Image (cartoon, rainbow, N blue to C red):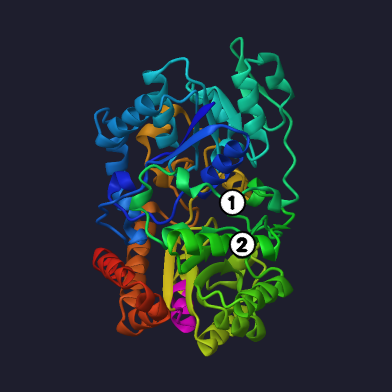
Amino acid sequence: MKILLIDPPFYRLIGYYNRYFPLGLSYLASVLIQKGHEVLIYDSDCNISPSKMDLSRLENYYPMYLESLGNGTHYIWEELKGIINRFKPEVVGITGWTTFIASSFKVASIVKSENRDLPVVMGGPHITLKSDEVMRECPDADFLVRGEGEIVFPELIEAIGMRKVGVFGSIRGVSFRKNGEVFHNSEADFLDDLDRIPFPARDMLVNLKYYGSEDMGLMMTSRGCPYNCSYCATSVWGKKVRYRSIENVVREIRMVKDRYGCRQFTFKDDCFTLNKNRVIDLCGTLLKERIAINWECNTRINLIDEEILTKMKKAGCNSIKVGIESGSERVLRFINKKITLDQCKNAAKLLHKIGIHWTGYFMIGLPSETKEEMCQTLQFMKELRPDYASISVYEPFPGTELFEIGIEKGLVERDRSLEDFFSISPKYYYVKDVQHRIDTMGNGEFEKIEEELKEKFHKYNAGIPRLAKRAKARGSLYAREPKILWSDFKKFLSWL
């Protein structure tokens, strides 16, 4: 069958930079191709002429996003129609994340406007966590794939292709409609052997030429997270951590390096250094086989020490991103972060000592958080001196413990309507009252603190020492690919 997989637009609609390619859809494409299907991946968020970079000001452009959703003649929607009519798919799959779920619904509507009989399948984190709401509010969704799709989606495609309507009810992890009713099948099991999944089908991307070599270096070497931070919806991957073998990871690195000229990789695992021995083995393999690359990863401050950082740097790691979140011990306990301020201080010292560029993620606006605690977060950030400090405002996401706490406190609305998604800023999708976002102060006071802290974080990041350290961290990359230096310089100007 001919299958079109679509990553809906969000950043592109508001002129923002958007790195990488849609990894999840590319994995789906690879297993579908293995089954003999013809697949095209349309990343409608691939922006070839971005103008904005500062994510701390992202929400200022949400009104532009909502306006684009209501503009039926927007060039991106016209582009989508053109791809549908040229490719003539027999099934369309659409990704759905909470922040841009309205865009996913819009894409589904356009697909149906072009061909009412074209089956639409939706999947992704939001679809998994809010399947009842999606089926109720999005009449253009014929099927939902909940959880991991690499096994479920091909089974569903086979049933659709053979018109085996009676089989839909037996495919675990699928939601579907029948005679006006909605059915949610039992949950599918997670994949235990990740090596069974072929490498992401990057070559199936529309406009492949628009992706830089660094964009192609996005990878995941594991799935799952054993931690239970109350603001994070880790349930879509499960608590059990599943790993790809070192051999499998290295083969993909070699393939991406040879085929796309990639020298800067990004490992998007939730906790890359969770298994210390595995990371040391990977680093040892990269060094032994003389695979000259740079790479970055996400991890936790309680999962690093001098030994592993030294090994990682030697093997090409030039950037680490960690979640600090708050400068208040009480808040850290409240969000079940399972770290302490002292651990953060020790990790910061180590990162500075080893000399790996590091980003600290911070958050404000959590339920029960006071003004004093928000100010403690600012002071703590300055004490830790991360090479880049990212600040965000807490948003309630379905599937999290804080979402349920927010409902109890009267801060969160459990469900939303289709009209809500197209009229409310994504920042407030599940906020019950935008004038009562936090339970410790009025909205006016909170907005003032929010703006002050964001401005101070921005000024901190604009400091010459921090900019110089980022450039130094990517120095070897610039030497190998000078055009990336020019690309980074343009991003810097946009960020300013």
Q: Is residue 213 above or below residue 46?
A: below
Where residue 201 sits in the image (x, y, percent)? 52, 46
Mark number displayed over residue 207: none
In the rendered image, which quarter contains the C terminus? bottom left
Asked which secondary structure carries label 1, the reply is loop
160 to the left or right of 356: right
Q: Is residue 469 above or below residue 43?
A: below
Choose between 255 and 318: the one closer to the eye. 255
Label 1: how many Cα within 10 Å (few below 14, some 14–19, many 20+): many
| Mark 2 neighbour class, 10 Å CA radius: few under 14, some 14 to 19, many 20 or more | few
| Residue 145, quarter of picture | top right
Mark 1 and mark 2 residues within 8 Å of each other at the beta carbon: yes
The residue indicated by pointer 1 is: 199
Tell me the tag on residue 251. Answer: 2
Relative vertical location of residue 179 with respect to residue 323 in this rendering, above or below = above
Q: Reading the chain from its start, which is encountered first: label 1 or label 2?
A: 1
Helix, strand or loop at mark 2: helix
Residue 360 drawn at (x, y percent): 49, 72
Q: Where is residue 90 drawn, in percent x and y?
A: 49, 23
Amino acid beneath label 2: Arg
| The N terminus sits in image quarter | top right
Foreground pick, 189 / 151: 151
Identified by mark 1, the residue type is: Phe
| Region in magenta | 376-386
Q: In the picture provided, is 322 more to the left or to the right than 20?
A: right
* Residue 379 counted in the magenta span: yes
